[in-house]
Image (cartoon, rainbow, N blue to C red):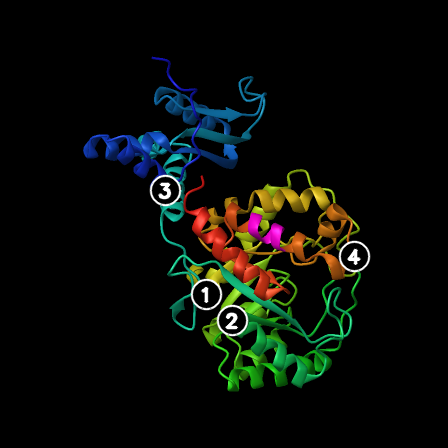
């Protein structure tokens, strides 16, 4: 009898369990082996060289490995990044070995333990006391720009009545959150007067809240606008600066018990595309967002009420945007929900050769890829089409590793 050609499997931990069941593996053996079937790559930055060398030896002794800078072996550097490679079972044993060791390895053990538990636990984004992610459904945020100059729909919903009608339509189409913005943050955009921003967003937020829209967010970087929006019925602040443009923003969020979305950007909208050079794109985005999350926590807002956004299109080129989407899942290590906004953006037009009015298919494809990569929420203009797409993606993603 000829054996069949081997297959390389791509399965989630749940998929591994189901595969062993199909193979009629002993249940106790299946439980023990599941940790061997899940492989992890964990990056640690700026690790003390002594700690890094001990870490590598410990992981080698467990059958895994740790990649270090090439000059680490020559002892000519003080610190090095490290890439830990091993199964879930090996990582668990490593954590136990590191506890109590010198050179900061005990602290690293606690941090590794926390990150692993975060990845293995259910996702949370708590708004108004309710976890919006409790059923595993990908959230869809509808974009409602009440501006004259937004890159896609500027001027279309400047009339409050038309804006409210579109917001209600988004809810009927399946949006979980309506995101109201009164200042364009497209590349090259100039600031608008705070009074103008307020006059645009507050009437719309008030009317949407009066009509029973359950979750409203306001897209702003100003604490003044955020405070009045929260008092008018919004419950989420969506800040493209990660609450770095206005230092009063974090206290406003904490005082209101609101939730917040922290996005990565570099520079201001008027100049954010001037410098697109990164030494290490993911490391820099991750570091920025980690700092923003820690500052928000220090101000009193817990991680369960925070969401991070890698800032696709904000200070990035086409290749960088694609990399961020492909590696979205790495941001889950921050212990927050993850949102990605790709809708109708210029990088999609560059890829498919389409103007902003003809980017529907590309937008849905990019949003779907982000969800498969690890996004908990997508921010979109085309709500109805995206809601249908992510329903299908949600059924698939639980099976794909």
Asked whether the beta carbons under mark 2 and mark 1 sit within 8 Å of each other, the answer is yes
Alpha carbon distance from label 3 to label 2: 29 Å
- Residue 355 tag number: 4
Asked whether the beta carbons under mark 3 and mark 4 sit within 8 Å of each other, the answer is no
Which image quarter: residue 205?
bottom right
Task: Tell me, yes or no, whether the highlighted magenta stretch contains residue 134.
Answer: no
Q: Residues within 10 Å of mark 4 (few under 14, many from 20)?
A: some
Alpha carbon distance from label 2 to label 1: 7 Å
Residue 273 picture location, percent across and down: 77, 52
Q: Residues within 10 Å of mark 1 (few under 14, many from 20)?
A: many
- Residue drawn at x 36%, y 39% as measured from the top left: 15
Q: Name the residue under label 1.
A: 301
Query: Does dot 1 land on a helix, a strand or a loop?
Result: loop
Query: Does dot 3 land on a helix, a strand or a loop?
Result: helix
Asked whether the beta carbons under mark 1 and mark 3 sit within 8 Å of each other, the answer is no
Alpha carbon distance from label 4 to label 2: 37 Å
| Circle nearer the N terminus (3, 2) | 3
Position of 68 with respect to 99 (left or right) is right
What is the magenta range? 364-369
Alpha carbon distance from label 4 to label 1: 40 Å
Note whether 174 is above or below 272 in the view shown: below
Q: Mark 3 points at which residue?
A: 110
């Amino acid at each position: 009898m000829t054996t069949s050609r081997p297959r390389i499997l791509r399965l989630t931990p749940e998929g591994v369990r189901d595969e062993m069941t199909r193979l009629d593996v002993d249940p106790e053996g299946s439980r023990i082996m599941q940790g061997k079937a899940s492989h992890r790559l964990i990056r640690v930055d700026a690790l003390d060289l002594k700690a890094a060398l001990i870490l590598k030896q410990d992981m080698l002794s467990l059958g895994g490995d740790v990649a270090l800078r090439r000059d680490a072996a020559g002892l000519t550097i003080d610190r090095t990044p490290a890439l830990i490679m091993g199964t879930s079972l090996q990582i668990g044993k490593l954590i136990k070995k590191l506890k109590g060791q010198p050179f900061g390895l005990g602290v690293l053990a606690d941090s590794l333990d926390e990150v692993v538990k975060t990845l293995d636990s259910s996702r949370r984004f708590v708004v108004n006391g309710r976890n919006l992610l409790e059923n595993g459904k990908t959230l869809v945020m509808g974009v409602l720009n009440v501006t004259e100059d937004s890159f896609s729909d500027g001027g279309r919903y400047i009339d409050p009545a038309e804006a409210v009608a579109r917001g209600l339509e988004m809810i009927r189409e399946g949006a979980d959150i309506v995101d109201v913005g009164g200042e364009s943050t497209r590349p090259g955009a100039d600031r608008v007067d705070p009074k103008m921003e307020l006059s645009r967003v507050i009437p719309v937020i008030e009317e949407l809240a009066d009509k029973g829209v359950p979750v409203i967010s306001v897209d702003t970087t100003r604490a003044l606008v955020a405070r009045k929006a929260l008092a008018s019925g919004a419950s989420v602040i969506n800040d493209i600066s990660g609450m770095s443009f206005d230092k009063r923003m974090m206290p406003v969020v904490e005082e209101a018990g609101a939730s917040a979305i922290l996005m990565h950007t570099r520079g201001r909208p008027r100049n954010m595309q001037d410098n697109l050079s990164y030494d290490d794109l993911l490391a820099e985005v991750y570091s920025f967002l980690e700092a923003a999350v820690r500052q928000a926590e220090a101000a009193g807002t817990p991680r369960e009420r925070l969401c991070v956004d890698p800032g696709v299109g904000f200070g990035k080129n086409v290749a960088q945007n694609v990399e961020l989407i492909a590696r979205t899942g790495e941001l889950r290590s921050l212990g927050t929900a993850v949102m990605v906004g790709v809708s109708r953006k210029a990088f999609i037009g560059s890829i498919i050769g389409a103007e902003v009015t003809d980017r529907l298919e590309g937008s849905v494809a990019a949003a779907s890829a982000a969800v498969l990569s690890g996004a908990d929420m997508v921010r979109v203009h085309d709500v109805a089409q995206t809601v249908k797409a992510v329903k299908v993606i949600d059924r698939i993603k639980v099976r794909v590793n």
